[in-house]
Image (cartoon, grey):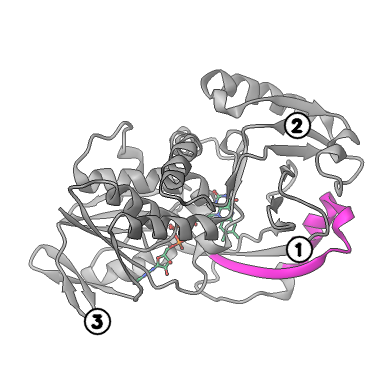
């Protein structure tokens, strides 16, 4: 079986990697890293158990997404790919109000009965949380959750693409279009059309642009996110992720003495790839409110990404009813690094006609 995967963000790269592990599948991964590729900008917090989204169908995918990671990382390690950017560093949810954290602790403890991967949970009264994250404001209490992880999406995407190549998959760097021939869809490249048994469209926020050529539309729009990376003097590799409960902003430490302040959530920007004064002000203000100890750190880099947003925050996953050889996987929104590998594997399973362990109806394309 031949499968073409469009998009090598977290979703497409994982779908292609899954397919490349099968002896029965010839996989072609196609990507033209367009400006604003979300996987390269994403903060990489993997902690779905304390999310503000309460939709159970969202939670099914997000929690399975978090659980999918250790197996994926193991498979990459076995291929010699150890620089994956994934690490279970834990997270601290912070608040000035200890009662907010008592309530959260109760909810997380209940969830842990079903998801032991949540690990240790521990309440840290101010200023004890500073032992975990020294730059934190001294009036913040925290709830520590050991099972949370963080991911450098750039490193994982690169490791996956290398993994696909090692497994004899083909990688094409080009912006392609889809073509309709009767009721079959082909991939149009500079070298000619690719006829595949299945095409997986994992083109993130650009999915609609691609599908409109074949007369299909789904409700995915770009949401701009601006995120600021600071360089630090200290070793930040084991710092936990910081998740303030009063805001949608957050702080994510990485291995290379780097700490990210994230991020704006700007709807209606289209693909306007710019850093703005207002965006940077918002991100810095929110970050420094929580971690004033970072005020003298150097601004190293600002990244911009377009989250592929669906109106109900749930992903789109399934075959296009009119075109049975096309599977679409997108709309992962602000949780795409959490869900991406699992959704990618499901898209691959659909293409390979393998059994799927969950009900996909809540994620159908025509909702
Ligand atoms: P993308 O990564 O955008 O990949 C799509 C790819 O398709 C791109 O490379 C694009 O160039 C390619 N493509 C499109 N059209 C074509 C074409 N015609 N031909 C060839 N290639 C094409 N998620 C979390 O879980 N936790 C977080 O903490 C988190 N933080 C985030 C912070 C920011 C600032 C942003 C922007 C996102 C964040 N996310 C987070 C969300 C996550 O990054 C995205 O949901 C996820 O990366 C989307 O992956 P994707 O593969 O669907 O799309």
Residue 284 covered by magenta stretch:
yes
- Residue 322 in sight from this viewpoint: no
Q: Is residue 281 left or right of residue 28?
A: right
Secondary structure, mark 3, is: loop
In the image, residue 73 lies at what x, y percent?
A: 47, 43
Residue drawn at x 80%, y 59% as measured from the top left: 232
Q: Is residue 83 left or right of residue 350?
A: right
Q: Which residue is mark 1?
A: 230
Residue drawn at x 43%, y 47% as measured from the top left: 76
Which of discs 1 and 2 lies nearer the camera? The answer is: 1
Q: Quadrant of residue 88?
A: top right
Secondary structure, mark 2, is: strand
Q: Which residue is mark 3?
A: 190
Viewer-proximal residue, 74 or 309? 74
Residues marked 2 and 3 touching at CB (< 8 Å): no
In the image, residue 220 lies at what x, y percent?
A: 41, 59
Label 1 CA crowd tier, 10 Å (few <14, some 14–19, many 20+): some
Which of discs 2 and 3 lies nearer the camera? The answer is: 3
Task: Work out whether 58 lies above or below 180.
Answer: above
Q: Quadrant of residue 43?
A: bottom right
Segment colored magenta: 280-305
Q: Which residue is mark 2?
A: 143
In the image, residue 132 lies at what x, y percent?
A: 81, 39
Residue drawn at x 57%, y 63% as measured from the top left: 41
Viewer-proximal residue, 168 or 211? 168
The answer for how far apart the CA atoms under marks 3 and 1 are is: 40 Å
The answer for how far apart the CA atoms under marks 1 and 2 are is: 24 Å
């Amino acid at each position: 079986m031949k499968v073409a995967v469009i998009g090598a963000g977290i979703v497409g790269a994982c779908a292609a990697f899954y397919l490349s592990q099968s002896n029965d599948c010839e996989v072609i991964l196609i990507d033209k890293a367009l400006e604003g590729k979300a996987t390269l900008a994403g903060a990489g917090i993997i902690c779905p158990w304390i999310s503000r989204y309460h939709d159970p169908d969202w939670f099914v995918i997000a929690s399975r997404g978090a659980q999918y990671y250790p197996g994926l990382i193991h498979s990459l390690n076995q291929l010699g790919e150890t620089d994956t950017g994934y690490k279970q560093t834990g997270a601290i949810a912070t608040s000035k109000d200890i009662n907010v954290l008592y309530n959260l602790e109760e909810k997380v403890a209940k969830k842990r009965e079903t998801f032991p991967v949540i690990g240790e949970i521990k309440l840290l009264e101010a200023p004890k949380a500073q032992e975990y994250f020294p730059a934190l404001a001294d009036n913040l209490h925290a709830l520590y959750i050991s099972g949370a992880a963080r991911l450098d999406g750039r490193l994982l995407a690169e490791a996956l693409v290398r993994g696909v190549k090692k497994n004899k998959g083909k990688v094409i760097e080009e912006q392609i279009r889809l073509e309709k021939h009767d009721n079959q869809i082909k991939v149009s490249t500079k070298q000619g059309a690719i006829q595949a048994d299945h095409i997986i469209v994992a083109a993130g926020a650009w999915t609609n642009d691609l599908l409109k050529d074949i007369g299909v539309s789904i409700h995915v729009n770009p949401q701009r996110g601006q995120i600021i990376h600071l360089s630090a003097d200290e070793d930040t590799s084991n710092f936990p992720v910081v998740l303030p409960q009063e805001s949608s902003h957050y702080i994510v430490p990485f291995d290379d003495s780097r700490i990210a302040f994230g991020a704006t959530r700007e709807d209606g920007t289209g693909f306007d790839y710019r850093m703005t004064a207002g965006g940077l002000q918002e991100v810095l203000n929110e970050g420094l409110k929580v971690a004033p100890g970072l005020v003298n750190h150097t601004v190293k880099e600002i990244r911009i990404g377009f989250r592929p947003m669906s109106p109900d925050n749930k992903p789109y996953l399934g075959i296009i009813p009119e075109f049975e050889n096309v599977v679409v996987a997108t709309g992962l929104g602000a949780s795409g690094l959490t869900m991406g590998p699992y959704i990618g594997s499901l898209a691959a399973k659909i293409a390979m006609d393998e059994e799927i362990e969950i009900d996909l109806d809540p994620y159908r394309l025509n909702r």
